[in-house]
Image: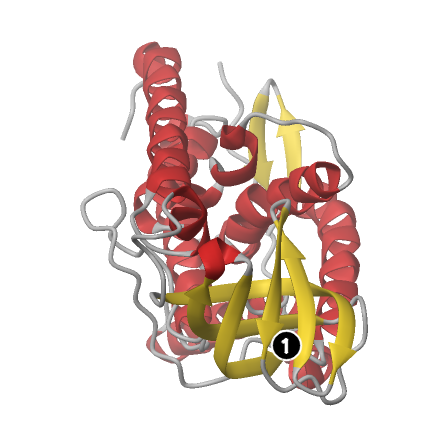
Amino acid sequence: MADLLTHAAVGLLLKRGQHAARQRTGAADRPLHLASFVAGNLLPDLLSRLPVAITSQLHSHGLKLPPVLLHGFGPLHVPAGMALASLALSLAFRREQRAAVFGNLFVGMLCHLALDLAQSHAGAGYLVAFPLSKTPWELGWIGTEATVPVAIPLLLLALWSWRGRLPRSSPPPESP
Amino acid sequence: MIPDRLRWPVLLLCLVGIGWLGVASTDFAENRDAGIRAALRDPVGYEGSEVLLMMWWVVSVEGPDHFTATRWNVETAVEGPSEGLEPGDVVSVSGTVHDGGAYVRATEVQHHRWRTAKEALGVVGLLGALVAFPLAFRRRDGWLEERF
């Protein structure tokens, strides 16, 4: 996995690109769903890697844990689990926003996976088609820590690109 | 999209689906017919088979061509270049397994020198997310809303 700051920066920059494209086509007033998209870029690691980091540390210190707590979070980092997690999270939003939130969360998560797939894990790769296929795959273009030196500059660039342009979502109409 | 009356059944189905994926993933990790776990289960059958020790911690360095690594409560000796390695470092080792998993003869040792920095960025990112999420979303009338 690339680091979280790089994932956040990539999410912000991709949405900035979409925002700029909409400004050119005169559709800048459409909701951008920046929050859901950037959250989607972060959630695969927060939902799968963070719990495993905690349980594996506990396990390495001798605490006996059921194997599902060590290996069971992995599918939240592959498309099948991402789709289910996005759908579950989108249900917390109003019906009229649900489809857009689901789409932005899910596509954000897929962007996260795409960046991770660029890394080389010595052939280990990711089970991108799990549970249909258990064959790991990755592009292997960059090392697993290649994003570390660029993470902070990239995030600063992403934040700078949004300066003074944050599109506030308009509140929904009041219910009668 | 999903109508409100189906919200809870769909949420339940999502959680069941995620749980099922987790169980399937655990079964795959524990019982796959490759890797160091399989070699430990069947030392004779897997003698000389290829393994990948992904992101293992160095426990000790015994010499220029020997070190010991651990992960998931499995510890194995590695016969391979150990120059620059210190206990606590993270390595990925490709090689072949021997003596029932007692040692791995490395064909490639990758030293993850930036691992600590990456983990530090992960912690910074986590703290940033904890701050950013409440700023990016709000609750109104029992529903979540995006602020941006």
Q: Position of residue B141 (x, y in %)?
A: 61, 18
Question: Compared to A84, does A74 lie above or below?
Answer: below
In the figure, residue B11 lies in which quadrant?
A: top left
Going by the image, does B113 lie left or right of A116? right
Q: Residue B105 placed where, x, y %?
A: 50, 75
- Disc 1 marks a residue whose amino acid type is Ala
Q: Residue at x 61, y 43 (%)?
A: A52
- In the structure shown, which secondary structural element does the residue marked by tag 1 occupy? helix
Q: Residue at x 40, y 42 (%)?
A: B41
**A88 to B113, vertically: above or below:** above
Image coords of residue B36 (percent x, y):
45, 55
The residue that disc 1 covers is A158
The chain carrying label 1 is A
Q: Is residue B57 above or below residue B29?
A: below
Can you tell which quarter of the image residue B63 is in?
bottom right
In this view of the protein, which residue sits in the foreground, B123 or B128?
B123
Looking at the image, residue A171 sits to the left or right of residue A159; the answer is left
Residue positioned 58% across, 49% down in the render: A49
The outermost residue toward the left is: A132
| Residue A75 visible at all | yes
Q: Quadrant of residue A151?
A: bottom right
Q: Is residue A146 visible?
A: no
**Closer-to-camera residue (B129/A133):** A133
